[in-house]
Image (spheres, rainbow, N blue to C red):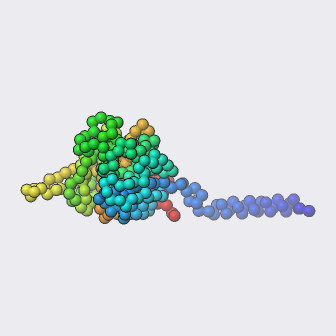
Amino acid sequence: MINPVASGRFLVQITAALSLSAAALPLASVAAPAPIRVLLLTGGCCHDYEHQKDILKKGLEARANVVVTQVHTGDSSTKPPLAILGNLEYAKGYDVIIHDECGADISNPALVEGVLKPHRDGIPGVNLHCAMHCYRIGNPNEAVTDLGTPHGYWFEYLGLQSSGHGPQEPIALHFTDPVHRVTQGLTDWTTIREELYNNIRLFDKAHPLALGRQGVKKKDGTTQTNETVVAWTNEYGPRKTRVFSTTIGHNNATVEDSRYLDLVTRGLLWATDHLRKDGTPAKGYGPSPR
């Protein structure tokens, strides 16, 4: 026959033990938020994407609670067969897309609209370096004048139209909005030899964050100083999708520079709304303990 008093004491002891066990668990294992799911697109012309994709993945995952999935092609043409092309659901399951591909001659309007669909639907975007020269429809040197036309599809998403760059020379970066969440606390710096992208048009909803200044020697021996916007945010489409972009990042040494990775991480966290006003990650979205 079961003794009800003893049974009651046993239940109390078990309950207390379970409570103590739960209290002893690390707080992070109980309440850690799910990581931000990042889709990183790389491949195409003119860059060492084979190594840069891994530099970016390692650098971002070390700086924020993110998991980076890579979609890469080793094709180095200006029309690489990116796996996302023609797949309207390519961004399903992800929280943000990083465009680091280089496909200047991918110009089919239907394909470009397919790449843009997730962003029109509200998925944030981060765009690095040659992504600014992708998906060009028409002459990229002609400023977009009519919004919503194929010529402006990609540039409207970016918030800035660029068509080319000068020689590789050091670029002095100056943060023009030091109180923005992305740039809060970041200091000006000068890159190694890098490409300064031109600015054809800055769209109304784009907000410049940094200027790049580069001195270029002319044939007559004089030096010409060029200055353009090199980092900015944008608000895209009817859902006001957050978009962060920087034209810096041609060479591996720049991509693995801690200052560059800090900037890109800030941009990603801002785009996904996981960045505090002081520029630090929201609770649970700093470096992961894993």
Q: Tell me where residue 5 sits by quadrant.
A: bottom right
Q: Residue furthest top?
A: 146
Q: Residue at coordinates 42% horizontally, 61% vertically from top-left?
A: 57
Nearer-the-camera pick, 123 or 184: 123
Q: In which quadrant will I find the N terminus?
A: bottom right
**Residue 225 seen in the current view:** yes
- Residue 226 percent coordinates (x, y): 19, 51
Q: Is residue 159 left or right of residue 36?
A: left
- Residue 290 percent coordinates (x, y): 51, 64
- Residue 85 percent coordinates (x, y): 41, 49
Q: Is residue 89 left or right of residue 43?
A: right
Q: Is residue 197 left or right of residue 65?
A: left
Q: Residue at coordinates 27% horizontally, 36% vertically from top-left?
A: 145
Q: Residue furthest right?
A: 1
Q: Residue at coordinates 30% horizontally, 35% vertically from top-left?
A: 146
**Residue 258 seen in the current view:** no
Residue 14 against residue 115 in the figure, above or below = below
Q: Residue at coordinates 27% horizontally, 42% vertically from top-left?
A: 138
- Residue 264 percent coordinates (x, y): 37, 55
Q: Is residue 242 left or right of residue 20?
A: left
Nearer-the-camera pick, 271 or 57: 57
Residue 95 against residue 142 in the figure, above or below = below
Total number of numbered discs in the rendering: 0
